[in-house]
Image: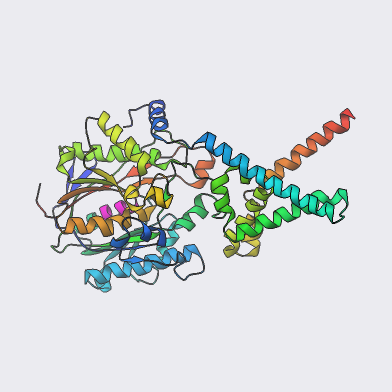
Amino acid sequence: MAKRIGKQSVKFDKSISIKSTAATVGPKEGEGPLGKYFDVVLEDILAGEKSWEKAESKIVSNNMKLAVEKSKIGMDKIDYILAGDLLNQGSGSNYGVRDFNIPFFGLYGACSTFGESMCLGGILIESGAAENVLVGASSHFCAAEKQFRFPLDLGTQRPLTTTWTVTGDGAAVLSNEDNSPYITAITTGKMVDLGITDANNMGAAMAPAAAQAICSNFKDFDITPDYYDLIITGDLGKVGMELTTKLLKEEGYDISKNFTDCGVEIFDPVSQDTHAGGSGCACSATVFSSYFYEKVKRGELKRILFVPTGALMSSTSVQQGESIPGIAHAAVIENKRGNN
Amino acid sequence: MNKKSKQEYQKMVEKASPNSNLILDCIKAFVIGGLICCIGQVITNLFEYYGFSQNDLGIYTSSVLIFIASFMTGMGWYSKLGKFAGAGSVVPITGFSNSITSPAIEFKKEGYILGVGAKIFIIAGPVILYGILTSMAVGIIYYILK
């Protein structure tokens, strides 16, 4: 059975295999530095639908089917779907999986949702409640802008600390089969709020949560940063990455040598004008499900700490002057089991 | 991490967050804003040249500028101009036009009543409300002093 380690972590006993992954992205992401790694790059941000919201659900549906297809497990063997997105009431995922006829848990962890779904999927398999779990997270740039910010055609300037919401969906099939790579442990994040109220600086709002989760992972397992080949956060962007590095340095951990962020990797800030980086549920979900998954599977990275990060505000809470709490969920993903 | 004081963290954030170039942005806003006003002046002069009455010149010029900005918004050009010019394209009447056209386009998918109808003034609404309130207040003061 799973063993609880320290205050926030769990070590899995069974094999929690990431059998397959799939990543579908929008045109802009396809033009970015990681473009060639994604399974599907859409030419049309509307994906042939009439609205951005419908497009997001279609992307979810198609990409999840693709992940299952790649796993060769068969849709009828999937015991649960765990998925979430940024839209109100999780409608991107709800409508995306409505025809699947599979037990479904809708999740909301803002941009940390992919991490949340992986952690919970691992727990479901470890507990024996499921053999195969389909997990995923999605976001859509236009739909997110519409819900959280301004109309797209409004002529405004975006501050340099803002990030660009990734359009796409990342999905993974978790299974109790013995197939590399594996989720071997998780560290569940806590809500951390250091009083940031600027919704245009989400990296700063999430950095303390990321640092807290990473720090707890080190402490719970009594390890140092070099235990991992790479520590990969979700969508902190340039500003959040710098802050997380500093916060962890104050705690006595130097992660500057093996630390990266999906938001920093996915876009080229100069040619793509994305400012601090990429963000949104799909940011960590698509980058992990393509680029990093393959690297761990091939053994180029033997052990990573994958830490999707989320800023848990609503447009109402921001208008009411509330500060923005962050959260980060960490999953230890390894090429081989039993390394530790 | 929770032990760190919010003030300390705020200082760290300010240090880590890049600021936009204020002087360059001011110059861009000045040039583009000025250019829009010059175009307005040209339109006014043209109307005057073709013999329109002095009293109506302002209204005709505004209408033309509003149309041009709405058209540019629909074509997706105004957001690009706004990104470059900042306040330079927000402050003139063209910016006001853009702030009404852009939600109208965005919320069309929710229908003409609850979408376009309800959301069209989502950006411009505060300007209209407080503009009217301020002019009422000024009107009352003017009436008393007069």
Return the x and y of residue A220 as percentages of the image width and height: 19, 38
| Nearer to the camera, A161 or A319 | A161
Relative to residue B35, is residue B138 drawn left or right? right
Return the residue found at the far front: B49
Residue at horizontal 38 percent and vertical 29 percent from the top = B12
Q: Tell me the residue at 29%/37% (across/down).
A: A212
- Residue at 61 percent across and 60 percent down: it is B74
Q: Is residue A127 visible?
A: no
The answer to whether any part of residue A86 appears in the image is yes
Q: Quadrant of residue A218?
A: top left
Range shown magenta: A112-120
User: Viewer-proximal residue, B124 or A15?
Assistant: B124
Q: Is residue B108 magenta?
A: no
Q: Position of residue B118 (x, y in %)?
A: 65, 56
Q: Is residue A195 left or right of residue B26?
A: left
* Image height of A178 relative to B34, above or below: below
Residue A316: x, y in percent?
52, 45
Residue B123 or A154: which is nearer the viewer? A154
Q: Position of residue B77 (x, y in %)?
A: 58, 56
Residue A116 magenta-highlighted: yes
Please identify the dominant SS of the magenta region: helix
**On screen, A273 above or below A246?**
below
**Location of residue A221 (image quadrant):** top left
Q: With A41 as the anchor, is B83 left or right in this view?
A: right
